Structure formats: structure tokens, C-alpha cells
Amino acid sequence: MPAVDGGAAGTAERWTRVLHEGGPRSLPRREGTVRLYLNGVRPALLEWLDRYDHLGEVTRDDVLTCLKALHGRHSHSQLVAFHSLFGWAKRNGLVFRNPTSRIKVGQYEYAVLQPLVPEPVDRAVAAARTPATRLILAFAAVHAARVAQIGTLMLNGVDIGNRRLTIAGRVHPLDDLTLKLLLDWLENRRTRWPNTANLHLLINNQTANRTTRPSNHCIGAAMRGQAATLERLRVDRQLEEAMVHGLDPLHLAEVFGLDEKTAMRYADSARRLLETSTESRSVVAASPDDQR
């Protein structure tokens, strides 16, 4: 039988290093994931370190007690982190049993994504006063491009003759609005920096004399402080696609390059919004005032 590790703190530290650096049977996690896991287990670990000498003493009831104090996504995130910690410790012989083995993570129910109303969109359009910011707005609102994807667009990703635009490896048809804004920007770009060697589509005073891309901060600067941020416009575009062109997650995944879970979330939100709209119309139609 494997020996139990003598120190809870040492076990937790080793697990943290494996999360960050990887190990023989696990790949390193992204920094954001590591922080999420650590924030999830830290309060419980501090309490258990005062009560137990090693993690092998932690029981299923201890885990459930911690989870009962949280709700929604916080409870979900903490349980995922507990599964990771104790699963790793059990596989490596540092605990005899995994106290989370009979506790299911379940499916976290996300809030329904909501479409933007016209007013914040109009304010965002009014705030885009330059050829560059108007084009950036179109990339987010029409093509659902992320800020980082907009910043990394290259000149050779634009095919004006065939009216095609390549974003993150996916080819998008160039609609009339985006084409006009693109031509306006390219003319402005040639006028301001005729000798630049930078092959990124979007450049500014800082990057025109280099070959680097503009920062995410620069890309999103014009919409900062707006209710309709670039990210919010991107989400709204994908939700619109789901509501107008059907609730098929495969269609959304194909058009926008979404992973399966994200595409299903958009499709589910669109379905629930459409159902709510139908119910509202039914209530209005059945109103006694309309039947007089």
C-alpha cells in the first residue's frame, strides 16, 4: 500500500508545481487556469492545514461543507479544483482515497446571453471617428473577430478582388460595409505611412516604423468606456447568427470557429430568447384588451 505524504502543505505545493510546469503524466496548464484552481482550493486548504497533518485525513464531508458555503459558478469552480488536487494526489500515492470521487461536478448553467439594444451600439458607432476605429468596429460587429485576432490581421489576409477576408485562418466573405471601410483605411494607411515595411493590416504611429502588431490596448481604445465594447459586439454578432440562421451549434462552429461547448451555449441562449419572445407575443395576443 502506498505511503501517505506526511505534509498537507507539501502535497499542495507539489500539485501547484505540476499544474504550472507539467509532469510525467500531465501537461502544464495556462496561467489563468492555475490561478483559478489555486483560488478555488486556497480557503479550504488553509482551514484543513490547521486541522490535519496531511490531506489523506480530509473527508467527503469536509469537501461538501466547503461547497455548501458557495453558489453557482464559484461552487462549480471550487469542486473542479478539488477534483484536480485529490485526483493528482491519489494517482501519485500521496493519499489513500480521493474524497471527491463520489461528488459530481455537473454542468454549470450559464446565464442566457442577451442581445445588445440599439442605443449602446449607436453610441459605439459614433465613437469610432477614424478610418482605423471604424474598420475595427466592423471586424468585431460584422465578423465577430476577437481583439487579438484583429491586431494580428495581415495585409495578405485581405483579398479585395475576390472579396474575401481571412481572420484566424478562417475565410470570411467581404460584405459591402466592411469592404468600404477597408478601402478607406488602406487609403489612409498609404497616405500616412507610404514607406512602412510593417505587413500588419492595422498599424499606428508606434508600429509603422517596426514590424510588430498593435497592442490589444490600442485596438480596443476607441470603444473603452462604451457599453458596447468590441467583445460585447463580437458576442452580439454570434448570438444574432444563432437567432436568425437557426439554432444549429454545428453551423455556429463552422461560421465562427467556435468549440462545441461555446457553440451550444450560443444556440441554447438563442433558443431561450426566441421562446421568451414567442411567449410574450402569445400573452399580448390573448390580452382581453385586444379582444374587445
Image (cartoon, rainbow, N blue to C red):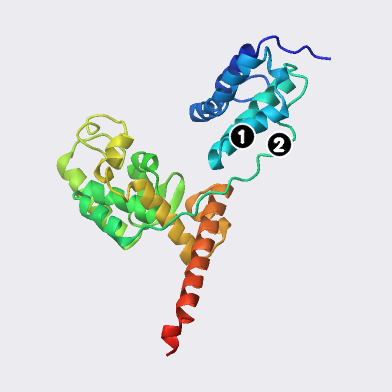
Give x and y (percent) for residue 37.
56, 28
Instruction: Left or right? Give the position of 188 relative to 36.
Output: left
Count of numbered badges drawn on the protein: 2
Q: For the residue marked with disc 2, what is the amino acid?
A: Ile
Asked whether the residues under the numbered discs 1 and 2 touch, taking CB atoms below 8 Å apart as contact, a structural biologist would say: yes
Which residue is denoted by mark 1 in the rendering? Answer: 67
Q: Is residue 266 above or below residue 16?
A: below
Instruction: Tell which of 276 and 65 is nearer to you.
Output: 65
Q: Name the secondary structure under disc 1.
A: helix
Mark sitting earlier along the chain (1/2): 1
The crowding category of the residue bearing disc 2, from other C-alpha atoms within 10 Å (few below 14, some 14 to 19, many at least 20), is: few
Q: For the residue marked with disc 1, what is the amino acid?
A: Leu
Which residue is denoted by mark 2 in the rendering? Answer: 103
Residue at (67% x, 15% y) in the render:
52
Instruction: Tell which of 228 and 62 is nearer to you.
Output: 62
On the question of residue 28 being in view, the answer is no
Q: Is residue 51 above or below residue 156?
A: above
Give x and y (percent) for residue 146.
40, 44
Q: Is residue 181 above or below residue 221?
A: below
Residue at (65% x, 14% y) in the render:
8
Residue at (32% x, 47% y) in the render:
229
The crowding category of the residue bearing disc 1, from other C-alpha atoms within 10 Å (few below 14, some 14 to 19, many at least 20), is: some
